[in-house]
Image (tube, rainbow, N blue to C red):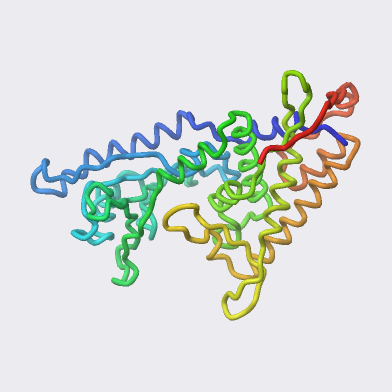
Amino acid sequence: MANVQKQLEQFHEAIKLDEENAILREKRERVLNRLKEELPKFFKESDATPKFKIFNQGSYAMGTGIKPLSGDYDIDVGVRFEIAKNEHDPVEVKGWVFEALKNHTSQVEMRRPCITVYYFENGKAIFHVDLAIYSDGCCNMDGKTYLAKGKINSAPENREWEEAAPQGLIDLIKNRYDDAEERAQFRRAIRDLKRWKDIQFPTTGNAAPIGIGITVAAYHWFQPEFKITDSFSGKRSYDDLGALLRFATMMLANFQQTWCDGEWAERLEVKLPMIPNKDLFEKMTNNQMAYFKSKLENLRDALEDAEEEADPVEACKTLQKHFGEDFQIPPKEETARAMPAAVVSSSSSA
């Protein structure tokens, strides 16, 4: 069996997006400063401006972000207004933020789930900030937080306050494992699968499985994989290849026959582990889901082939086809010198 742990860790270092990325922080702060400056202008008195709190969300907050192949970096921000949802139309509240930011850059959009601010360079989008707008639970009779959904011209039935627990999901993902090394492998697997997704599904929209879907799938089905290299000290050697293989296999095992769009189809349901508990892949068509399954099967087979391959160079060539050019193939002389670590016993953690 080839040992490609070093190459997998190098791949992860090449694709990961540092949570402390200075440029992303700077873009985020520019947007938020603009919001704080402009928002009071829409209210007659400054003290009548609704109070709000800001928090990071999405992969940036969860520590699972990767560098985009397109070069268009994004950051997700939550804006939690201290208002009661029963007193305001959700699009009205989103309108406050849109009006405050609409002249900040050349393109600001009100999308159904958020407000998006784009930054361009030489006519190409290089960053965008998504702002999700909430009604804070402290102001609602039921104590729950709600996400504002809808667009400027949305019909009444398409405007809604959707119950949400954004900070709860962040905490679940960030604290999925108590052990720091297991948690690190969990994040590496998520990032690896997200880059695999970007390589294998270059199109946008519902044709590709969304990143948060892969993250939550890992929350449900990923298991750390390691070997005990010293039975006396309990020292572990982590096996990312084995962990990825088990994760892909578990995802495939959870495809089920489901009645959808007037037909029976094999589908993977990945539900949020908290409100609103929706299936994150529900927008994929049956044909798109079938294509997703076939790609997962190809990945599983490639991971099995790499695991069985004796030559690390050949194993890495197999993996590069699925993970892209950032997965480096080591030179022959390097792998010839590498001696596999002695394994005393093996174990994997649930």
What is the tally of numbered marks visible in this picture? 0
Height in image: 123 above or below 93? Answer: above
334 or 302: nearer the viewer:
302
x then y, percent, for residue 298: 77, 55
Which residue is at 46% across, 40% downward?
Answer: 171
Vertical order, 31 against 154 (above or below)? above
Q: In which quadrant of the rendered view does residue 46 lie? A: top left
Asked if residue 254 lies left or right of residue 2, the reply is left
Front position in the image: 257 or 104: 257
Q: Residue furthest front?
A: 232
Extreme residue toward the left, this view: 45
Specify the farthest residue to the top: 233
Location of the C terminus by quadrant is top right
Residue 135: give x, y in percent of width and height.
27, 51
Residue 246: image x %, image y %? Answer: 73, 47
User: Is residue 30 among the parts visible in the rendering?
Assistant: yes
> x, y percentage for residue 247?
69, 48
Asked whether 259 or 298 is in front, the reply is 259
Residue 122 seen: no
Query: Which sits in the foreground, 302 or 248?
Result: 248
Indicate the quadrant where residue 95 lies.
bottom left
User: Which residue: 32% across, 39% down?
Assistant: 54
State the image quarter where residue 285 is shown.
Answer: bottom right
Residue at x-position 28% and y-position 36%: 33
Q: Quadrant of the N terminus?
A: top right
